[in-house]
Amino acid sequence: MRHFFFDPHALRGRTPATAASASRRRWLLIAGGAALAALAGVDMSRVRAAEPRVIKVHARRFVFTPDRIALAPHESVVFELTAQDTVMGFSIPQYGVRADVPPGAVVRVAAQAGDAGTVQFLCDIFCGSGHETMNGVLVVG
């Protein structure tokens, strides 16, 4: 049967309907092979890039670690937040992001960076003397 698809002389002596059917099958095989080749060339890094980057942020009294985070403009991220010693707040007012982070829990918060620039994040639950210095910065650019 292999010669039937690739050998044009194999069609001699066939009825026009059979020859047309064989020709259609040949073109379907060629088109299917081209489609498979095109799919094999799909850049999977673009598919993976659609998934948000996970950024781990740990909070303890008066400190976020890390306290400086670099983001690409309009990048989608998920902050994975943990707290060590007391309930902390995590807030990015400019992006409308806010979460309570109890000690021992992992809280995930999605956000999308804006245009290039710097954006402050902060603890918005009073956690003791020194609370007012508990902040960090997102560097978008």
Image (cartoon, helix red, strand yellow):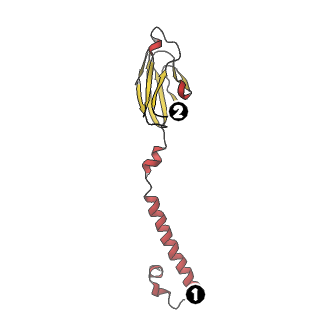
- At a point 47% along the width and 48% down the height, the residue shown is 47
The residue beneath circle 2 is: 110
The residue that appears at 47% across and 29% down in the rendered structure is 80
Q: Is residue 61 visible?
A: no
* Depth order, front residue of 111/81: 111
Q: Earlier in the sequence, mark 1 or mark 2?
A: 1
Report helix, strand or loop for mark 1: helix
As displayed, is residue 120 above or below residue 54? Answer: above
Q: Quadrant of residue 137?
A: top left
Q: Give the amino acid type for the residue marked by disc 2 in the picture.
A: Ala
| Nearer to the camera, 63 or 96 | 96
Q: CA distance from mark 1 to mark 2?
A: 63 Å
Residue extending furthest toward the bottom: 13
* Vertical comparison of 75 with 29: above or below: above
Q: Residue at x 45, y 16 (%)?
A: 134
Question: Height in image: 125 above or below 47?
Answer: above
Q: Position of residue 92 (x, y in %)?
A: 52, 25
Q: Residue furthest right?
A: 17
Q: Amino acid at mark 1?
A: Pro
Q: Position of residue 67 (x, y in %)?
A: 41, 23
